Amino acid sequence: MLPTGIQFSTYTGEAGILQTNRARIGVLLIVVLLLVAPLMSGPYLLGIGTQMFITLIAVYGLHVTVGMAGQINIAQSAFVGVGAFAAAKLSSYGLPFWVVLPLAAIITGLVSVLFALPAARVKGFYLALTTLAAQVLFPIVILGLPQEWLGGLVGLPVEPLKIAGYSMGSPKHFYYFTLVLVLLATYAAYNLHRSRLGRALKAVRDNDVAAEVMGVPVLRYKIMAFFTGSLFAGVAGACTAWFLQFVTIESFTLFASVWYLGMLIVGGLHSPVGAILGVLFITFLQEGLHEVATVVMRSQSHSVGGAVFATTNIVLGACILLALIFEPRGLAHRWSVLRTAYQLWPFPRQ
């Protein structure tokens, strides 16, 4: 709902993502704040910000598969790993980043199609098991291939990212690189809802039988949901490879896939805002608990600090449970309620 006085004279204006000047100014201020953040932050905070950007790109992909198409995916970390290993291998051939990045994304998308073919024919619990099989098979395949191919148990080293001959190995430079990518991913995630593909995916999610009766090829769009979501995962994987400068199977576990899904649940499945809020909330909560544990341990209370570290995952898991019980639509719904109340103030809500 829009405030009184906001009118549109064209369909293009009404379909815009940012429909008011206030919204445009707000987004511009956020972008400016992100641009100047490295000037006021050290390497530690820049590392957290960079990791958060990479995670957000991966969660955007999960939002497409789970939130828009309704296809349960517990293998997002494995697809991120495919992108990371693909980028590491392609970089070893001396290819530039503008070739490595799209190729890693496409390779990840093609791999996801192999699992999407059987997954597209099942639902619910069986779909979860199918994607779980992809997560389990990922390390088995990497370890089963010859070590000179993908490094096996040892892993693959990754050369620092270079753009036009300039190294992006410093925390500040790589922060700006991932910031540009996450802004592009955010733009793509928002516009996907307004596209023909996005409308078809949401039709399949709401009722695949009705969608098929209306002429939507359900099987094709389920496969496209996995492929599109894995494109985001491939980009996140390539960024992870350049960020860590070394990739191993230990970085892409089932535990990471569960946290990706948990972030989306806490934030809200059906909106890109949910992905943003979920990643922000879980990241800040996790880093806050770690900081509290570090301070406690520095005060010579090692046992208490260790207990705080140990309970971090319990607290994060409790947040997911509370979100499912009390706010299944996630933080995005709370944000929508607050935004509507602010836009309509001082008029009473009907």
Image: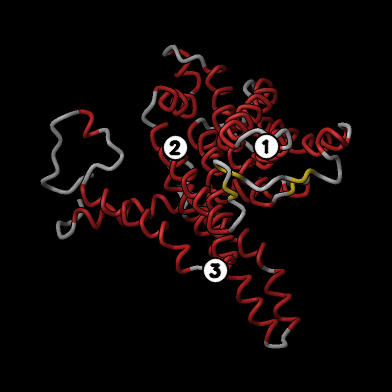
Residue type at mark 1 is Ala
Q: CA distance from mark 3 to mark 2?
A: 30 Å
Disc 3 crowd, CA 10 A, few/some/many (<14, 14-19, 20+) = few
Q: Residue at x 40, y 26 (%)?
A: 199
Q: Secondary structure at mark 2?
A: helix
Q: In the rendered view, would you say 137 is above or below 58?
A: above
Indicate which label's residue lies in the foreground, 1 or 2. 1
Q: Secondary structure at mark 1?
A: helix
Is residue 319 visible to the viewer in this orientation of the structure? Answer: yes
Q: Earlier in the sequence, mark 3 or mark 2?
A: 3
Against 36, residue 141 (above or below) is: above
Q: CA distance from mark 3 to mark 1?
A: 28 Å
Along the horizontal axis of the image, is 96 left or right of 346? right
Residue 87's tag is 1
Amino acid type indicated by mark 2: Ala
Check the image and report above or below for 82 versus 227: below
Q: Residue furthest bottom?
A: 300
In the picture, the disc for residue 42 is 3
Q: Nearer the viewer, residue 95 or 82?
A: 95
